[in-house]
Image (cartoon, coloured by chain):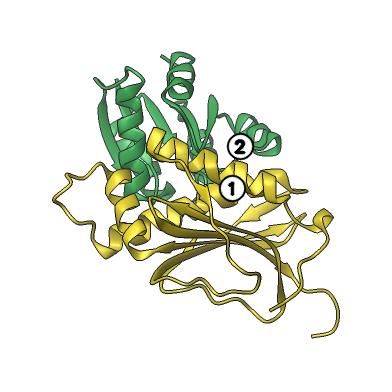
Chain colours: A yellow, B green
Amino acid sequence: MSAVLPEAEAPESADLLAVTEDVWMALLGDDGVLLPRAVPPGSPFDATAWSAATTISGGWHGVVTVELDEVLARRLTTRMLALPAEEEASDSDVADAVGELVNMVGGNVKSLMPGPSVLSLPAVAAGRAAFSSDSALACRLDLVWQDAPVRVSVHVPQEGPR
Amino acid sequence: MKILIADDSRVMRQIVIRTLRQAGHGGHDIVEAENGRQALEMVQTEAPDLVLSDWNMPEMNGIDCLSALRAAGSQVAFGFVTSEGSEEMRERAASAGAAFLIAKPFTPEAFDDALRSVI
């Protein structure tokens, strides 16, 4: 597992949490309360997951990733699309919703960091996120929504020889 | 009033439509585009009164769509609904001729304020 970088090169954890909480509350209203989750440093995301990442490049470089428990991702998609409770979200709807989630978090992280920069379109996968060996973890949040785990992380290019 | 919503995310188009309703603007005709290029074509074929557009989209992004519209002489009211609400993006949007920029995540009040500026 790569080292955590100095704060100046990454968003503050408190800022990343505020951005994530704002997104959750806007999408879910009063049901959008996220709780902290104690996870040992260096642990991979421990759930059957959906993951989405967006890249920021320009005045600042980084990758913002959201990983969600499978059940949570489907529940969130159902809420975002306002589907009837008995209707299950399709995989393409989940991919769309999870991508939009990381787009919102990533866009707000971009606004916090030096610019001008460009935000990529989100890349979404059914499964845990994989991180490039030439990137370093800069900031990570482990949270719980309705008893299911959520992870938001920011990786930046690793300094030094590759 | 006819509103064209351009966003590559069906989920976000649904959320925008729902938020318009919550903001008291549910009575408008809504048409949808999946990217900037489609939005550009639909401004001609659908003649909307307002375009609500995402910024980052495949095929053609929102700012290029707006620039193409203005270059073609269209003065349709155009507002961004985007996750990128920095001052730099707001300035770029305004310079290109956008009436407003609503940053995601948003509230119904933000939609009401923005729409009142163009209705």
Residue B4 as seen in the image, left or right of residue B81: left
Q: What residue does disc 1 label? A: A107
Kind of element beneath mark 2: loop
Nearer to us in this view, B16 or B105:
B105
Q: Amino acid at mark 1?
A: Gly
Which of the 4 image quarters holds residue A41? bottom right
Q: Quadrant of the C terminus of chain A?
A: bottom right
Q: Position of residue A92 (x, y in %)?
A: 29, 62
Say what secondary structure mark 1 lies in: helix
Q: Mark 1, chain letter?
A: A
Q: Residue at x 53, y 24 (%)?
A: B99
The answer to whether residue B77 is visible is yes
Image quarter hosting the N terminus of chain A? bottom right
The residue identified by callout 2 is: B85
Three-letter residue code for mark 2: Gly
Q: Position of residue A117 (x, y in %)?
A: 70, 52
Up/down of A36 relative to B91, above or below? below
User: How many residues crowd mark 2 within 10 Å: few (<14), some (14–19), many (20+)?
Assistant: some
Instruction: Identify the residue at horizontal 60%, vertical 76% (top origin).
Output: A131
